[in-house]
Image: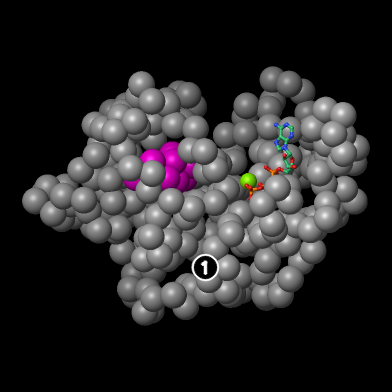
Amino acid sequence: MRYGRAPEVLRDIDLNLEPGSFHFLTGATGAGKSSLLKLIYLAARPSRGLISLFGRDVNAMARRDLPFVRRRIGVVFQEFHLLDHLSAFDNVGLPLRIAGARIEDYRADVIELLQWVGLGGKIHAFPPTLSGGEKQRLSIARAVVNKPDILLADEPTGNVDHAMALRILRLLVEMNSLGTTVVIASHDQDLVRRSGMPVLHVHDGGLHLIGAAPQASAAEPAPPEPARPESARPEPVPHDDPEDPEAQSEPEPPPAAEGEA
Ligand SMILES: Nc1ncnc2c1ncn2[C@@H]1O[C@H](COP(=O)(O)OP(=O)(O)OP(=O)(O)O)[C@@H](O)[C@H]1O
Ligand SMILES: [Mg+2]
């Protein structure tokens, strides 16, 4: 893969992401992590080689099919890509609205999800008024709201403290245990180590698999914090406003779908 006439960023990559797998994506800054994710979510085309998604050759896909394929992929962008003129609620609800859902059918789910990522007190806030970590959590909520088959997260913990990073990791592990294929680009070596998950390392244009853990371990909780509650439900992130009654209810985990990658 190359940008314009620049040298190739990625080359000779042979990667098969099994449905339901969980990988970290590491590598030096500028190595090509975001570029690899762009190839997977169809924001970039390979200059040579083949990519197939959900069993279909990407190059053979009709243009009109691309939005439907993209809807099956949730993306947490490195720069968030939130819509500043929409509230937190509307940002998260947007993928559902685009898919044709009615607000009365998704209102409760979106509020629950916002509570779950600790933004129950910011439902009507606009992105420019949120902190970096809050924007990050908002973008995570938006990525998971329509039950993607694949979740790609580009530095999803780059703007939060360590405790929050571990909570986000738990959320992503939980999504994965419900069937979603997960790839997380991260510079956080501690998080990667604690997760025990296999690592794809980008170096010198190539991709190297390090420490492939057996598939089954992908659903295990990371060792970061004490065992998960028996209900296999991650705890909601602490609410910003403990006075808010919305913060008191424990939301369901975000929905995740089964599917193939
Ligand atoms: N839109 C673009 N146009 C031209 N070159 C680009 C573009 N996006 C990225 N690049 C170049 O491609 C290379 C890989 O960039 P990429 O963003 O994939 O790296 P990364 O591993 O995600 O880095 P970081 O850890 O800093 O996020 C870099 O040399 C970068 O300058
Ligand atoms: Mg990047």
Where is mark 1, residue-wise? Answer: 191
Q: Position of residue 208 (x, y in %)?
A: 79, 63
User: How many marks on residues?
Assistant: 1
Q: Is residue 42 left or right of residue 177?
A: right
Q: Quadrant of residue 228?
A: bottom left
Q: Quadrant of residue 64?
A: top right
Q: Is residue 195 above or below residue 70?
A: below
Q: Nearer the viewer, residue 219 or 88?
A: 88
Q: Is residue 217 left or right of residue 226?
A: right
Q: Is residue 7 left or right of residue 172?
A: right
- Residue range highlighted in magenta: 134-144
Label 1: which secondary element: helix
Q: Is residue 139 magenta?
A: yes
Can the viewer see residue 66 in this picture?
Answer: yes
Q: Is residue 218 above or below residue 126?
A: below
For the point 59% across and 59% down, the residue is 187
Q: Main secondary structure of the magenta part?
A: helix
For the point 25% across and 36% down, the residue is 123
Amino acid type, mark 1: Leu
For the point 31% across and 64% down, the residue is 235
